[in-house]
Image (cartoon, helix red, strand yellow):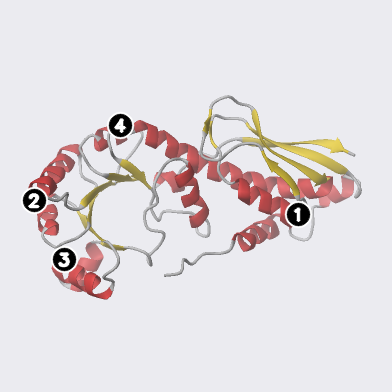
Amino acid sequence: MAEPGEPLEDLVARALAEDVGTGDVTSESTVPAAARARARIVQKQPGVVSGLAVVAETMRQCGVDDVDNLVVEGRWREEVPADVLLATGSARSLLVAERTALNFLGHLSGVATLTARFVEAVAGTGARILDTRKTTPGLRRLEKAAVAAGGGRNHRMGLYDAILIKENHIALAGSLAKAVHGARTSYPDLAIEVEVRNLDETAYALGTGADLLLLDNMDTETLRGAVKLRDENSGAGKGPSLEASGGVSMETVRAIAETGVDFISIGALTHSAPTLDFSLLLEPAT
């Protein structure tokens, strides 16, 4: 199935239109039209850089094609300040691109950095960190790419590429068994995940043939019980994967991972990541 989503060029164009409007009146009135400049984008906080392609596209649409990346995305950088990108071109064009480029870069690098912190927090447990659909409208593909850059794993991209049966689906279908049967019949090639809220629902869901169980807002004792139920009812196989979700923080994620779940999904990766601090510094160029 084709993956929907706005092309990067269109997304950047909309962002620039929002910021630039009819023109950068400050630069047009203070900077000579023929002036050229060199720009350095400087990372000012430790973390993981993500979003350099969006910066380059922003620069390109503003008329700056001489752009060089100085770092590889997806690697933690502790030593700051440090240059991450160089660009040369019209001084006015660089000033027009500045804020939109830094907005994208700071947000996406913030997502990657928060993800990396969570990944490090569960290191050695076997649990993988997942994102969710709690993303900024229009930025989902970029934010999920940032999660991947930070070492996390992408959950479903949208409603179209995976099946997740929740409470409301079950109520409207008539039962969990009917919901799973309908999903399996309609989309036999897609994995089916079922949301459960307690051990009784977990035990029932294990008998439906679901591929994954979403353990919603369970405390660590209940999570351990769900893992035990899965393992006891899996026979020679591994049984469905288990995903813990709800109430996950940096303080709780390690304990959740140590219960034996396979995945931990965290909406905060995309909806609450602090922006990573960058600056764009200009100097005249001949």
As rendered, which of 2 and 269 lies closer to the eye? 2
Q: Report the residue marked by disc 1.
A: 62
Query: Marks 4 and 3, Cα distance to the nearest angstrom?
Result: 35 Å
Amino acid type of the residue that numbered disc 1 sits on in the rendered structure: Cys
As rendered, which of 36 and 133 lies closer to the eye? 36
Q: Is residue 26 above or below residue 42?
A: below
Tag 2, which secondary structure? loop
Query: Toward which corner of the image does residue 40 lie, by quadrant?
Result: top right
Query: Marks 1 and 2, Cα distance to the nearest angstrom?
Result: 60 Å
Which label belongs to residue 118? none
Q: Upstream in the sequence, badge 4 or badge 3?
A: 4
Q: Report the residue marked by disc 3.
A: 176
Going by the picture, which residue comes out furthest to the front?
236
Residue drawn at point x = 60 percent, y = 35 percent: 277
Amino acid type of the residue that numbered disc 2 sits on in the rendered structure: Gly
Q: Upstream in the sequence, badge 3 or badge 1?
A: 1
Q: Is disc 1 in contact with disc 2, using a CB cutoff of under 8 Å?
A: no
Q: Residue 14 location, x and y as percent? A: 65, 61
Amino acid type of the residue that numbered disc 3 sits on in the rendered structure: Leu
Residue drawn at point x = 27 percent, y = 75 percent: 186
Query: Toward which corner of the image does residue 35 lie, by quadrant?
Result: top right
